[in-house]
Amino acid sequence: MHTIICVKQVLDPEIPPAKFKIDPETKKVIPPAGVPPVISVFDERAVEAACRLKDKNKGKITIISMGSAKAADVVRHTLSMGADDGIVLTDDAFENLDSFGTAYVLSKAIKKIGAFDLVLCGRQAADWGAGQVGSILGEMLGIPIITLACNIEVTGQALKIRRIVRDGFEVLEAPMPSLITVSSEIGLPRLPGGMGLMMARRKVIPTWKAVDIGAEAAMLDKANSHTEVTGLSVPTRKSECEMITGVTLVEAAGNLAARIIKLV
Amino acid sequence: MSPVSATYWGISGYIIFWVFFVVAAGLFVQRTWFLFRLIRLGKPENRFDHMGQRINNMVREVVTQRCSLKSVTRKDLAGFGHAFLFWGFSLFFLSYIIFIGLAGGFGLASIILGGTFERVFSSILDIAGLFVTIAIVWAAIRRYIVRPARLQMSAEAGIIMGMVFGLMLLHFLGDGFGLASAGVTTSWPPISGAIARLLSGSSISNLTLKHVYYSLWWLHYFLILSFAVYVPRSKHMHILASIFNEIFIPLGQKVVIEPIPVEEQENFGISKIQDFTWKDLLDLYSCAVCGRCHASCPAQLTGKTLSPREVIHNLKEHLLEAGSALLTPQPVTAKDGQPKEMLGGVVTEPEIWACTTCGACQEVCPVGIEHVRKIIGFRRNLTMSQSKMPESAQLMLRNMQSRGNPWAGVQSMRLRGDWTSGLDLKILADGDTTDTLFWVGCTGALVERNVKATLAMAKVFKAAGVDFAVLGDAETCCGDPARRAGYDFQFQVMAEQNIEMFKSHGIKQIITSCPHCLNTIKNEYPQYGGEFKVVHYTEFIADLIKQDKIKLSNELNSTLTFHDPCYLGRYNHIYQEPRGILQSIPNAKLTEMERSKSSSFCCGGGGGLMWIEEQPGTTKISHMRLEDALKTGADTVVTACPYCLQMFEESIEHKGIQSKLKALDLVEIVEAAMKQS
């Protein structure tokens, strides 16, 4: 079983809100100094899902990441978790692509890699949070798409997927290959073991450019972009604190419940 | 004439003597050979360097009994008892060789016995015997009536005390009857001589006296042989093993954490007996279950399941039980009771994660047992081979891995270099060089409360005209929390990166604010080729005061108590510098907590436990330590470690006594006491 996972390197979402700065002119985020970028938490969970499948069914995991050359750091992290190979897609032409452009680059890379049984993505990226790339990529590859998976099992030649819905979950069956986006409910990603860390340090992570994957220039042209950023602003945070009291603990709890009901 | 030269039921006494000797010696050798083979199951470790110094150490510790006397306190005088037992019994051991072995077994009685030598030696033995007897009676009273918490009831202790008591009794009576039957009634030796005079004065016939003497003599001999057979089969193998353990104790740092061997592939750390080194296994034999570690372990005293005494004792039992199966080449049959899993069974995860690595156990251990590295060995296996650890540990390690520091999220609302803003500091950029680096540490750079101390430090250094630089946002974690949590790969990565960076900036001297950074960079980076002069800021400031570069002239009007951080005191022996600084402040009164200096009590934050959730117990370690500080009546508890400071602040707040006691970093006091120009 060959699983390909698309991962993204993002600005650390744990940086203090006060340190988060943007440039409204260029409509770009200004990365604060001294904060190393991290793997998008949702993508890390997709890697965890793949590792669990590998633990049970054996197979191979290939990681692709589109971004700067530094994305090799997050790819190496996934290798230490249990992935077998990693590739970084970096090219000036890949910069500032929208979801559609990104999915196109990823699809070209996946086609170059060759045969696969499953493609995994995080449910969304931890920076822009559009949640589009997975679905568009599935379309481009021409394979079934299942979003928001919280459990994946292999049953013979098919996949059994538990998918999060608003009021619970549904269980779906899909053929291989399919594309699945993984939701946080799948559980905490593993901490790499000593073996994994050692293997990952030794691995070579190749870099592919636009020409390597045969990406057409027109598809990467910003003029053909499907989306346009018209404005960028930092949301203002407002928090109010209201003390709910009561003579007894039971009464206080009752008052609190009544107040919450009013809010919903 | 000696009892051995007589004939019994037609058999020569010599034959009886040597037959029993050979049987006993055989049993002794059989057992010690078995124990030796078990030790050889352990991995190799080189502890054979500086043998002269090592033997010298052992003699100094054992012969002078410094090992047991060093732990004597007003509350625990047992060390005296052990010393008297040891000295007294050593004399008896000598006497067994001379009087029983040479005089009896080799028929040299006519040369050795009856002269001044015998009279003098017997007199010394009488007095020694008296001390041994008193020590044994005292030990019995302590063990069975007083029952201090550190002692555990065991049949073995009772048997050995009975044996030693029996040996003393047989010495007095045997010599008494012997002297009486020979018609000697001198006043020396005092006790057996008195018994002899008593017997001579009675109407017992000389022949009866002689018969009783012979019987007692043989009884004495058999008891000595039984003792030799029993010792290596009981916890008193301590007598044999601890002598060697004292030879092989670490010569430098007490807590030695070795890097992961390069050839290690899958099984990291310790999960089974063969993963220990031979020294670790010798440690187990050396333990006499005295329980001093048990009584000083902060985890144990706050009701956690961890007891260093039990860990060592249980591991020994496991070694003796499971080890014999490992010695036999055929595979163990699976049917009846496989030996317990060592990691998880003999030593459990809650015990392993309760340790703060404070080193109090090793400090008090009279025989040089290395507890901490065993715990870290277990952690290595859990984190690196099994990925089994508390969620809080995982979070910390993930943060170190992806963010370069153990703090993240809501715990830290700052960025690494933030504290430097507004200060005129030399911040090292790529290619810059400096001689002296002020290494701030993650907590000092990121956590609001500790940043205050960092700022004070920078001001003090500047005021003293120190030429130093900082790394600002380029600084990362030293790796300590990862190493203590057993995740050594992460530590190794950070150590190598930092060493390379230090070298690229031409750094010669590093001043650390955190004792954990101090210990790591000073004592553990050399394992990876990083040799720098590393000093703690308390040493550095003490030096600045000595050079008159800092004058502490403002009055303080405060009663202070200094809390020794484990990694400053026990790990790096810096006790005097912080006290010297505080004492040089006008009107500052320094009081000591009952547990201070080398017996200081951990704040609860070491060993990664600043981030790893404290195991359930009766109270938090930090809360117990706060009580120690309160008992002194001081208004300020001073420390020199960012973890300790946080722990004290948290427990002061928890108790709601902010008006009664405040916690300060020593550097904050220094800054306040410096003359404002």
Image (cartoon, rainbow, N blue to C red):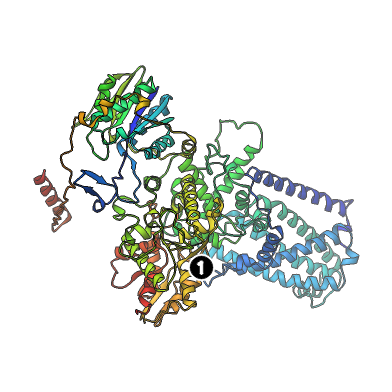
Q: Is residue B399 left or right of residue B60?
A: left
Q: Is residue B81 above or below residue A214?
A: below
Look at the numbered disc 1 and give the secondary structure of its residue.
loop
* Rendered residue at 17%/55% (across/down): A249
Q: Is residue B267 left or right of residue A221?
A: right
Q: Nearer the viewer, residue B483 or B318?
A: B483
* Percent of width and height locating residue B88: 70, 67
Q: Nearer the viewer, residue B94 or B262?
A: B262
**Quadrant that contains the C terminus of chain A:** top left
* Rendered residue at 56%/31% (across/down): B334
Q: Amino acid at mark 1?
A: Ile
Residue A147 makes an appearance in the image: no
Q: Is residue A149 above or below residue A157?
A: below
Q: Within 10 Å of the Cα at label 1, are there few (<14), some (14-19), or many (20+) other Cα atoms?
A: many
Image quadrant where residue A76 sits:
top left
* Percent of width and height locating residue B200: 82, 73
Q: Nearer the viewer, residue A74 or B384?
A: A74
Q: Nearer the viewer, residue B8 or B259?
A: B259
Residue situated furthest left in the rendering: A262
Q: Is residue B21 above or below residue B125?
A: above
Residue B54 makes an appearance in the image: yes
* Percent of width and height locating residue A200: 46, 36
Figure disc tally: 1
Image quadrant where residue A80 sits:
top left
**Residue labelled with disc 1:** B574
Q: Chain of mark 1?
A: B
* Percent of width and height locating residue B566: 47, 62
**Quadrant that contains the N terminus of chain A:** top left
Q: Is residue B636 above or below residue B25?
A: below
